[in-house]
Amino acid sequence: MKTEQLALFLISPDSTVVEAMQRIDRNARGILFVTNEQQKLLGVVTDGDIRRWLIRTGELKAPVSGLMNTEPKRISRKEHAKAHEVMVQHSITALPVVTTKGVVSDILFRDEQVAKKKKPQGILKEVPVVIMAGGKGTRLYPYTKILPKPLIPIGDIPIMERIIGKFCEFGTTQFYATVNYRKNMIRSYFSEISKTYSLEYVEEDKPLGTAGSLQLIKEEFSQPFIVTNCDILIHADYEDIYRYHKEAGNELTIVTALKNIEVPYGVIHSSENGAVQSMEEKPKLSYFVNTGMYILNPALKKEIPEDTFFHMTDLADKLLAENRRVGMYPISEDSFLDMGEFEEMHRMEEKLNLKSE
């Protein structure tokens, strides 16, 4: 492995969780090895370690030394031939090669594909997924003057079909689509394609927000169900999200994504009487944002007011005001693709290596 490639997988112990998430996004392997200035191996951090840390603490600026595994598996150069055996034995996908002084000289991967797919366990097979597809998509005007937002193509496939396809990878077979604006076009499109899933339509007579239309679904769900906006793609393990929701005892889980914002100016920190305390050049701010994907316990459907404009954020506020459990499942910035605006739509195409026809 070349030096510049190796650098993508190494991080210092003082680096923050945010920096680790960005580095993992770039190397697309879900793992980093923590080294000192001499590149001596100190520990290992995975995307799962980071996610568990954020769920437990919410601390984005903590150093990775606080969450790393300090006993990573490793081999010497002389043991190169048994690398695969070691990785299989310990169920790991990456293994650092170190010198006699413990310096990382190479990293070997069990699966040379960029991302190793885990075989779905089928826990989402009977889980209903509701796609909020009734909005006008005013931010994408004039596209949405002709097409409803769910049918705007990303590459040559409409966004809503891509969303369904992503869930189908995890075995999902039951979908509901809340529709309003140009609903007949949506019905027509999906009636003409072959499907391995069921798709039922929930028709709004008027806009009801991102949660209000859930009251129109007559079926009583017996297990937590998923709600997603129709203009986003989430690259994550949907089974792990669902499993986390149940194990955490949440009534509502919000899938959140890291968002980094750089202030394009020098920022002045002042005190009383206009005295300048310090200056900060182009600071970076990091937050977790709501992606528009949620897991809800079935009882929550009954708490949504009938025939009322009501957003998912209104439901979250209600639960929080009542001291009920609302959790978040964090994903990285690159794992969240939003086509709500033209610039983001083009980023989605680039991320998926697509080109609009």
Image: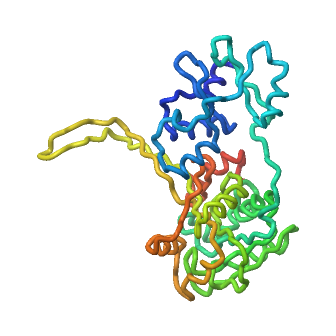
Q: Is residue 289 visible?
A: yes
Whole-percent x, y for residue 326 in the image: 53, 66
Q: Residue at x 56, y 82 (%)?
A: 303
Q: Residue at x 55, y 77 (%)?
A: 209
- Work out whether residue 137 or residue 291 is closer to the camera in this orientation and state it: 291
Q: Residue at x 68, y 52 (%)?
A: 236
Query: Hey, which residue is sitting farthest left in the picture?
Result: 273
Q: Is residue 1 visible?
A: no
- Work out whether residue 323 or residue 112 is closer to the camera in this orientation and state it: 323
Instruction: Classify 198 as above or below 54.
Output: below
Tell me the colour scheme of the image: rainbow
Instruction: Classify 117 as above or below 302.
Output: above
Total numbered labels: 0
Q: Residue at x 56, y 37 (%)?
A: 20
Whole-percent x, y for residue 169 in the image: 80, 57
Whole-percent x, y for residue 334 in the image: 61, 46
Which quarter of the image is occupied by the N terminus? top right
Left or right side of 281 for 143: right
Which corner quadrant of the image does residue 357 belong to? bottom right
Left or right side of 80 for 150: left
Whole-percent x, y for residue 87 in the image: 79, 31
Left or right side of 341 for 126: right
